[in-house]
Image (cartoon, helix red, strand yellow):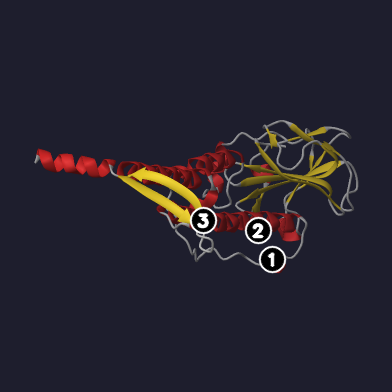
Amino acid sequence: MAEKKKNNGKKDQKLYHLVIYDEKTLNQKFNLKLTRLNLYSLFGFIFLVVAIIVVLLFTLTPINTLLPKYEDIKLRAEATRNRVLIDSLKHEIAVRDQYFKKIRTIIYGQDLSELQDIDTSNQKYIISPTAHDSLLKTLSTDLENTVEPPTMQGDENSLSTLRFYKPVSGILINKFNPAEGHYGVDLTAQKDEPVLSVLSGTVIMASWNPNTGYVIMVQHPHNLISVYKHNSELLKREGDHVEAGEPIAIVGNTGENTTGPHLHFELWFNGVPINPADYISF
């Protein structure tokens, strides 16, 4: 056994002569003496260098993206899920925009038949919430705290518990009469008197209309909207949050449908006009 190991050791130390000749002239171009052990070491070193280069290429360059991997499958699945979520969000935004368009159309006395309802009865996607939805959930909660969604349930009896501020300190001169197209009340007021928000909420419209002049509309909790028309100046813009009793406009005489300084005030509940005198003592 010892003799066999000795013979193997001699083989490893045996010299090999590597010579390269010119094919035409047979002149010697390269001459190298090697042992079997040196040859093994040389090939091992070359393999190690190649392995290091390959590892560096796959870790430090984008070449690894060319190979199909499990992470790529996860990314594609996540991208598909995000597209579905974006589609659902676009649909919800379209429904909300349609709701506000209807309110504006009613306020301006236009025909509702020109607006096409958005079909919400057939939802294509059902997405289960995950931990990644926490940020979106927080943002949507903040939005719900400022603007009530149009689908919120309630009845007029729930409004009796609210404390309404008088929009102006004036006298009621024209009562609520929806049969004649008068969806609010008219209040006399001194010129340049501030108009107050009856409840806390968010301004959803602040614009000019030829018939009603400067109009401002505030969305309140319980799916309630207050409307203030014929102002001479608006103090708030769309998206502003206002507190109950905070000035939002200045009494004026703007628009064609007015004969003197006064405030036309309306209350809308669940998209239907209600009599402000039932909830506010003028």
- What percent of the width, then of the height, locates residue 222? 57, 44
Quarter of the figure with the C terminus: top right
8 left or right of 178 in image: left
In this view of the protein, which residue sits in the foreground, 194 or 281? Answer: 194
Quarter location, residue 126 = bottom left
Residue beneath disc 3? 27
- Around disc 3, counting alpha carbons within 10 Å, would you say few (fewer than 14), some (14 to 19), or many (20 or more)? few
Looking at marks 3 and 1 on the same chain, the residue that comes earlier in the sequence is marked by: 3
User: Looking at the picture, which amino acid does disc 1 mark?
Assistant: Leu
Q: Secondary structure at mark 3?
A: loop
Between disc 2 and disc 3, the foreground one is 3
Q: Amino acid at mark 3?
A: Asn
Q: Residues at badges 1 and 2 in contact (C-beta under 8 Å)?
A: yes
Taking depth in this image into account, of 158 and 123 the one nearest to the observer is 123
Residue 156 place in picture, x, y as percent: 56, 47
Q: Residues within 10 Å of mark 2 (few under 14, many from 20)?
A: some
The residues bearing labels 3 and 1 have C-alpha atoms spaced at a distance of 95 Å
User: What residue is drawn where x is 66% and y is 67%?
Assistant: 116
Mark pair 2, 3: CA separation? 92 Å
